[in-house]
Image (tube, grey):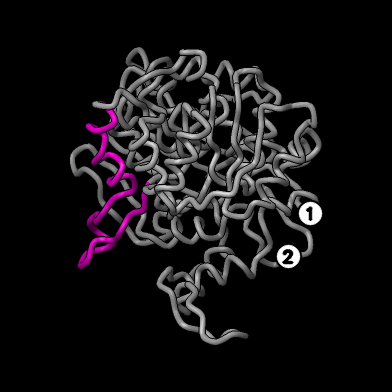
Amino acid sequence: MRVLLVGAGGVGTAATRIAARRNFLTHMVIADYDLTRAQAALDALPAQDGRFSALRLDASDEEAVRQALTEHRCDLLLNATDPRFVMPLFRAALATETHYMDMAMSLSAPHPSQPHEQCGVKLGDEQFALSGAWESAERLALVGMGVEPGLSDVFARYATDELFDEIEEIGIRDGASLAVEGYDFAPSFSIWTTIEECLNPPVVYERERGWYTTAPFSEPEVFDFPEGIGPVECVNVEHEEVLLVPRWIDARRVTFKYGLGDDFIEKLRTLHELGLDSTAKVTVPGEDGPVRVSPRDVVAACLPDPAALGDRMTGKTCAGTWVKGTKDGRPREVYLYHVVDNQWSMREYGSQAVVWQTAINPVIALELLATGAWSGTGVLGPEALPAQPFLDLLTAYGSPWGIREQA
């Protein structure tokens, strides 16, 4: 398999380190707008591994992406950029009839008059609108294949196939015990993406009602996370699973709740109140005259790079899927989960826990596609494909998952 990896940030770099230990790749081109980042990811790999190369590439330039896919004879484009670049990369892959995979889907837009009651443009709507074109091309666009969305959706598929006869609710629950020494505010993942998902109206799915929205940070609950993380208050956050799971899995209700903490929530609210979450460019003075820049990009530039926080970070992160329903006529409630200890991921891969946990899942999906264990055409989410091969390979990669009976 020949892969064009677009984005050599924390997740993209971690993906190269994981993939380098497997033999399914023929070649991976590591591409980034900043060639020094792509080269740094390449230089961190074993020197004798000629399966990797570096390339400067602007993810917003569809023509340049199409040329790169053609020139390097790529079978698949792996998108490790932030959601702003989903559609140009998605369209470039479709135009060249190249398989596609991402970890975050096309952006949403709030309902113009009732943002906290009704959906406007939903996450992934732009991608699913082109599903017929992907089917006609007999190519696969596997969307939302990170950890959340991604592994969480695989867990939902496994629960449906193996653990339940009927499902009342599927709830993604994400929590951590991570701390970063020396920083009062240092998000462990892209602040650009964090602002997007935390300040947009969260989406909830109910069978009788369909998709609808609520206010940010609504419906707080305390969820007890495994492996020593313990109780964490979680709140509703906009996330792709709620838009993916109901397309393939019959559940009465689907939610996503994230353990943010009061301090984190207040800082996000302050950014919003000051307009610093905006992506609309404003004019600011510069050394060579006025420049146009978005406030959100300024916030991102002022904060530490999440990929560089690993040495200062301690604790664990947990991604998982809580499922409630019946089996053999009796009530059942389980939590399927995956925990990564930052000390372990730094020691084994030199990547902090959150980006490593995100990166391992698309690499596993690449291997399943390369071996033919997974296949399909059109725009599919992870829950559209069999779960067992994925979970078996996750364990084989040395990062086992767990399941906890909740009652």
Disc 1, SS? helix
Q: Is residue 337 left or right of residue 283?
A: right
Label whose residue precedes the other's in the sequence (2 or 1): 2
Disc 2 to disc 1: CB gap under 8 Å: yes
Q: Assign the magenta stretch its main secondary structure.
A: loop
Q: Tag 2: residue type?
A: Tyr
Q: Residue shown at 66%/61% (left/top)? A: 186
Residue 206, given in percent of the width and then of the height, sits at 25, 41
Q: Nearer the viewer, residue 26 or 246?
A: 26
Name the residue tied to disc 2. Answer: 183
Q: Residue shown at 75%/34% (left/top)? A: 45
Magenta residues (range): 106-135
Q: Quadrant of the N terminus?
A: top right
Disc 2 crowd, CA 10 A, few/some/many (<14, 14-19, 20+): few
Find out whether residue 133 is within the magenta segment: yes
Q: How many labels sit on residues?
A: 2
Tell me the CA gap for discs 2 and 1.
Answer: 9 Å
